[in-house]
Amino acid sequence: MATPIIMPRLGDFMTEGTITKWRKSSGESVRQGEVIAEIETEKVNYDLEATVSGKLHTLVEDGTIVPVDDVAGYLLEEGEEAPPQVAEVAPKVSQRRESKSRRDEKVVSAGGAPVKSTPGARRLASKLGVDISQVSPTGPGGRVVEDDVRAASESGGSTNDEQLPPVGLPTPTETVPVTGIRKIVAEHMLRSISSTAQLSFFLEVDVTDIQRLRKEKSNEVETTLTIGHVLTKACAEALKRNPLLNTVLSGGNIYHFDSVNIGVAVALEDGLIVPVVRDAGIKSVFDVASDTDALVDRAREGQLSPDEVVGGTFTISVLGSVDGFTPILSSGQSAILGVGRSVEKPVVKKGEIVVREMMQLSLTVDHQVIDGAVAASFFRRLQQLVERPGNLFK
């Protein structure tokens, strides 16, 4: 029986992927587990493996963009002929797109040209009184999606003028379209802000002892423990005491987890990516450091696997060049910790003015899930771990 080769979903927000290269030619025999194609998305590159052994029958050429869950080819059993419909699948893929485009182009502009848009976008445009023909699309295939309509409504009804700078500005020296990772990050942040009730809390903690200890331990094990490594471990421990922050809100349900999977924000030249340190709650600080460093290296080399950028239950973002900032929640998660720089300053300790190394932490939560008392409890536990850090290094 012919086994379909399907474009996998390699991320929460992936809608399509590109078959950059077939590793085998159509008609060649392949073994189960053998890499048969290279897939590229806006976030990761991925080697697609054969799910069964058989003869490869491709339906699309190198460089073809294939929607998630669509069929790109088949694996045939020995002596098996391609199903009768296979010869027509490639045209049907195009026909499906054309058919979907026709459904999505029911609205026409004033000039009579069809406007590519989703049904949800058309309904929302009608509700908000937005002329959908004047909305700039950002969806797959150049379609207007609901977020585009909302943006147009908030800006006064049209987003076409985004192609020109506001009146009065000098001529720009360069115009750079928002694409790739930067576009994904922008959409992700806008979606997060619009779908959550974000509330932030701030706390200054004394990191004098934890900085000293991490330096001592780094020398003992001949590796570099950063404050980010240690704070990731501290967060994992604090979440055990305050598990409501280790949750995901989705589809009207709050999902609780025993595992603490901490996303670590990594800045790239063209955007931001958040690989996930899994089971940080049961790992030593040294294992957390090793895992984090490996993920950061692969992120900067563009070598992260799809599994390494999904599944986070909490996120930490270290921005050591500023005193403090308000991080934005990762989609669905209930909390994120922002870490500012540490600076020496005079503080009162046991009735005396002394110089200590202090750091500003910021905690953003989804107020739909987390109340202030719960956030404060997490912060109190985190402060205890940071200011009495001995147990973190065991």
Image (tube, helix red, strand yellow):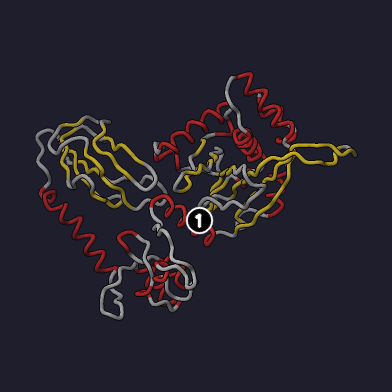
Can you say which quadrant of the picture contains the N terminus? top left
Picture quadrant of residue 284: top right
- Residue at image x 63%, y 33%? 230
Residue reaching furthest to the bottom: 110
Where residue 128 appears, x then y in whole percent?
45, 76
**Horizontal arrangement in the rendering, residue 83 relative to residue 358 (left or right):** left
Front-most of residues 216 and 150: 216
Query: Compared to 174, does 347 lie above or below?
Result: above
Front-most of residues 274 and 120: 274
Residue reaching furthest to the right: 351
Amino acid on which disc 1 is placed? Met
- Residue at image x 21%, y 39%? 22
Query: Compared to 48, does 59 lie above or below?
Result: below
Picture quadrant of residue 221: top right
Q: Residues within 10 Å of mark 1 (few under 14, many from 20)?
A: some
**Horizontal arrangement in the rendering, residue 145 relative to residue 98 (left or right):** right
> In the rendered picture of this protein, how many numbered marks are placed on residues?
1
Which residue is the site of mark 1?
189
Front-most of residues 315 and 220: 220
**Horizontal arrangement in the rendering, residue 362 relative to residue 142 (left or right):** right
Dot 1 lies on which element? helix
Where residue 137 appears, x then y in whole percent?
36, 65
- Residue at image x 29%, y 49%? 69
